[in-house]
Image (cartoon, coloured by chain):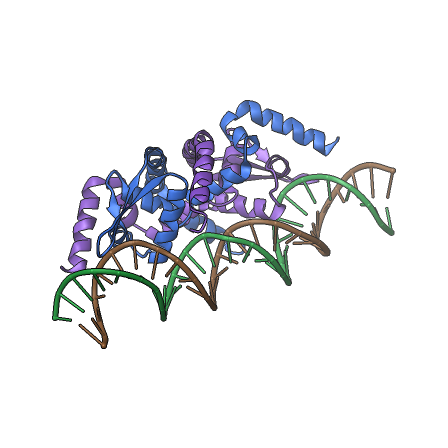
Chain colours: A blue, B purple, C brown, D green
DNA sequence: ATCCCCTGTTACCCGGAAGTAACCGAAGGA
DNA sequence: TCCTTCGGTTACTTCCGGGTAACAGGGGAT
């Protein structure tokens, strides 16, 4: 049995049974897909997207609302979101300066997905915490 | 103006306008929430969940299908998923050994969310790639 | 003259995620 | 006797996300 041929057959079955995840593996640019995925899953992005909600907010509002975020990480996160076209950044030439951030249409579409993720987590976190305890208890060596 | 009072007022407005993301910040265990989020967003989990789909698969099938994953990372990812109760691990006492993995009900519920994320990414990845190019071109120094 | 405000930037450090390579064990086959 | 298969484990190293602290800058208030 040729392993390569076997792998091809599996890829084929995968493509038939799971169109969207197959695309995920094979389509356009897996590196881009992965970068978007890890961006979504990073420490602050979903929080910022969520807090931004449907109102524009300024930098220091975000820093106050999001518990524990440093100015640096807020800047980094906002820059990345702006680069991806998920938020807009508006600077007001005042003293002291004022900068406001707002979700774009694209950003709002991501927000729906983010909400789905957030809902799933809050619905299932207790179950998962229990599963973890049980797993750790029943097999402490592994 | 008391900054603390201001922050409280913002938290309050947040709680009214965005119930689910407010829960996300304030509810049960933010560390658990974050650990789940980063697990979902890690390099391999969604891929494994997606490939597992609705069929059980054995270790070497997964290793063949998922492009680029090492045995170690596959093991690590599968263990974490098993610990959370998202997949089951079935060992057949044969020689050579056979081990099959399958999504649990909880795992399938996560799969729906994963699909939503995957769909969003594949729908919008080209737009985002263009946004990134434009951003990098128009402001190369930042 | 000095401090504060707001929105960052820069330099530096740390821990954990991820990658590489070698090894394991039991049974069957040459 | 040695090699192969499968499903891992172990040890070591590399990479990068994220954290801390200090500084910038320009006008207003004390």
**Residue at the image position 53 percent from the left and 43 percent from the top:** B78
Q: Pick whichever, B55 or D13, lies toward us.
A: D13
The image shows residue C16 at horizontal and vertical percentages of: 48, 56
The image shows residue B101 at horizontal and vertical percentages of: 55, 37
- Whether B34 is drawn above or below D27: the answer is above
Q: Is residue B20 visible?
A: yes
Residue B124 left/right relative to B23: right
Quadrant in the picture for residue D24: bottom left
The image shows residue D13 at horizontal and vertical percentages of: 63, 61
- Whether A48 is drawn above or below C14: the answer is above
**Residue at the image position 49 percent from the left and 28 percent from the top:** A20
- The total number of labels drawn is 0
Q: Pick whichever, A56 or B82, lies toward us.
A: A56
- Whether A41 is drawn above or below A15: the answer is below
- Quadrant of the image containing the N terminus of chain A: top right
**Residue at the image position 54 percent from the left and 56 percent from the top:** A141
Residue B96 left/right relative to D24: right
The image shows residue A21 at horizontal and vertical percentages of: 51, 30
- Whether A18 is drawn above or below A55: the answer is above
Q: Is residue A44 visible?
A: no
Quadrant in the picture for residue B14: top left
Q: Pick whichever, C30 or B8, lies toward us.
A: B8
**Residue at the image position 35 percent from the left and 35 percent from the top:** A116
């Amino acid at each position: 049995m040729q392993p390569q041929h076997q792998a091809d057959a599996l890829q084929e079955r995968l493509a038939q049974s799971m169109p969207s995840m197959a695309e995920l593996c094979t389509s356009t640019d897996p590196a881009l897909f992965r970068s978007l995925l890890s961006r979504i899953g990073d420490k602050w992005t979903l929080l910022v997207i969520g807090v931004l909600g449907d109102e524009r907010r300024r930098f220091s509002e975000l820093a106050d609302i999001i518990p524990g975020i440093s100015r640096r990480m807020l800047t980094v996160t906002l820059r990345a979101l702006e680069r991806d076209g998920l938020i807009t950044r508006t600077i007001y030439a005042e003293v002291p300066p004022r900068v406001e951030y707002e979700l774009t249409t694209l950003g709002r579409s991501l927000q729906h997905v983010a909400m789905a993720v957030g809902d799933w987590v809050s619905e299932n976190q207790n179950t998962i915490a229990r599963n973890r305890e049980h797993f750790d208890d029943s097999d402490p060596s592994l």
